[in-house]
Image: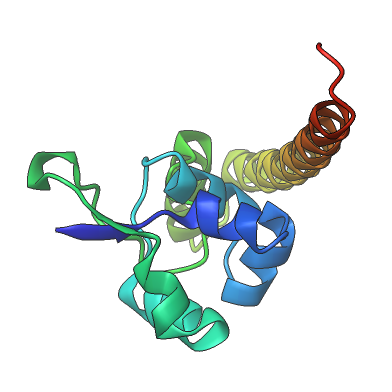
Amino acid sequence: MSRIDIARLRKNEGLSQRKLAEMLEIRPSFLSAIENGRSRLPEDKVEKIKALFGTEIIEEYIYEEYEENVVPPHTHIHDETDSLSQLLDKFHTLAHQRHNQPNDKVMELVTRLDKLSERNDRLSGKIDDLRDLVDQLRQENLRLKELLIKNQIKY
């Protein structure tokens, strides 16, 4: 089975994770999971990449992978690799199902779960920002190394 080396493509095109995620209409944390091999790029997003960059360019980033390493693709933008999000969503759904029966304790749980979900989303956003900063620092580091090499300075 083949796979696209998204990280190499993104870096060679000079894109941050956040920018490419926006272009593909997915969360940056999901793109990170794809780049790290924890998730698969959905087929519709593969087609979108081909449309954005051209099929000829994409061919140089395709490599073969063994079937046992394949992680099933996600079918929507929600970052399913986030266990906490999955758990909160499940609790939230259960709480709303019970919400049909008026109960102060259930209402309190629904409110707490809503706050935990919001907090998790804020933290995910901060993690995405930190990943962007790391990308920027890596690009600057690479630029500095290139300058050192160009000027024949050992580091």
Total numbered badges shown on the rendered structure: 0
Q: Residue at x 57, y 66 (%)?
A: 26
> Where is 1 relative to 29, above or below?
below
Residue 132: x and y in percent read 77, 44
> Where is 4 relative to 37, above or below?
below
Q: 81 and 153: which one is in front? A: 153
Q: Residue at x 72, y 59 (%)?
A: 14
**In which quadrant of the rendered image does the N terminus lie?**
bottom left
Side of 50 where 131 appears, left or right: right
Q: Residue furthest top?
A: 155
> Where is 28 relative to 154, above or below?
below
Residue 81: x and y in percent read 43, 43
**In which quadrant of the rendered image does the C terminus lie?**
top right
Q: Residue furthest left?
A: 67
Residue 62: x and y in percent read 32, 61
Side of 133 where 56 appears, left or right: left
Res. 144 image quadrant: top right
Residue 17: x and y in percent read 67, 54
Q: Residue furthest bottom?
A: 51
> Where is 6 relative to 84, above or below?
below
Q: 119 and 11: which one is in front? A: 11
One can see residue 95 in this view: no
One can see residue 106 in this view: yes
Q: Residue at x 35, y 71 (%)?
A: 59
Q: Residue at x 24, y 47 (%)?
A: 71
